[in-house]
Image (cartoon, helix red, strand yellow):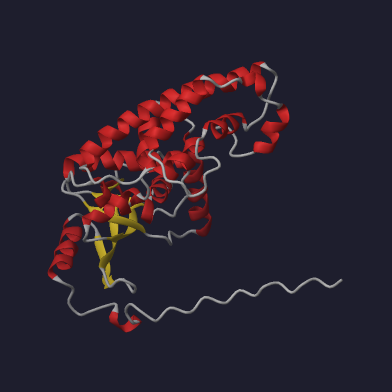
Amino acid sequence: MPKAAGKKTKPAAARDPRGLAATALVEPAPPAEVARLIAVIETDGGRVIGSYRDPLGGHWQVLAGLPIDKVAPTPYQRDLSETHVARLADAIERLGRFVDPIVAVRTDHGGYWTPNGNHRLAAMRKLGAKAVVALVMPDRQIAHRILVLNTEKAHNVRERAMEVIRLAEALVDLDDRPERDYETEFEEPSLLTLGLCYQRNGRFSGGAYHPILKRTEQFSTATLSKALQRRRNRADRLIALDTLVAKAVAALKERGLESPYLKAFVIARLNPLRFKRGAKADPDDVIEQMTTAAAKFDVSKVKPGQIAAAGGPPDE
């Protein structure tokens, strides 16, 4: 019997053309803010290659060579991966060219921060480079858009959470606005809570709890400082829950049950939203319910086949 023809998907409609034409990207005289940045770069020992407007949003940016010793990563970023740095350095040296400029903003202390390019910067230092080519942005707020900008190396949950919480704690002193005003910078509210958990325990199994927090948490209308205090309390409760989950996992292993999915299995069993598609819930209520259930978890009722069928993310 011939197979039924597959349903054809309608191609997405092409978007209307927008942005600037190629001939409009460069203007004879940049605005005063950009002209001042150009002068400052030259004073700092850099050399401006040119200034232009980006083709999509029309924002001004300056392409420049910067002394490498004046460029540093933003202080909020994830830690360097030495393996990735070595791989980049090898690729750059074999090619014999640095073809991917970093993004940079000038700081008040006369240097430059890069929110996007830390691994490339480290690779160039490893190769002994004296300078690095950068897209220097007049808007310093770009330095806070780490997750949006950083496509250099895929973030895992821990790296994303650590960057977000470092940025949040710095922004409290700079501009203590409502937490929800920083939605673009923080990407999702669960990363703030997980970041606080990782600060307390670098080996915290954030990936196991991420789906639950992502489903229940929202950005707060409270100021960032107040919102972070509430999240610290939530992180304390989440770590207490994880301690009970770890005890249950240990008890399962004592019974001879071995699987990389033990923690995911226990958490799934405790999750009150497990069979409630689309249901809304308060994250603190969910953590409390899971903590109560974890204290009563009976490992003697678990069968090996149930763990194999559960799947889920392997234990971290």
Q: Is residue 30 left or right of residue 8?
A: left
**Residue 196, how many percent across, how many down?**
35, 33
In this rendering, the count of numbered labels is 0
Task: State which quarter of the image contains the C terminus.
Answer: top right
**Residue 25, how many percent across, how many down?**
29, 77
Observer able to see residue 202:
no
> Measured along the vertical axis of the image, is residue 31 above or below residue 251?
below
> Measured along the vertical axis of the image, is residue 262 above or below residue 214?
above
Q: Furthest residue to the right? A: 1
Nearer the observer, 201 or 193: 193
Residue at image coords 64%, 38%? 311
Residue at image coords 62%, 20%? 299
Residue at image coords 38%, 46%? 125
**Residue 164, how many percent across, how many down?**
34, 43
Q: Is residue 139 left or right of residue 149?
A: left
> Measured along the vertical axis of the image, is residue 93 above or below residue 158?
below
Task: State which quarter of the image contains the N terminus.
Answer: bottom right
Residue at image coords 71%, 72%? 6
Nearer the observer, 282 or 8: 282
Observer able to see residue 138:
yes
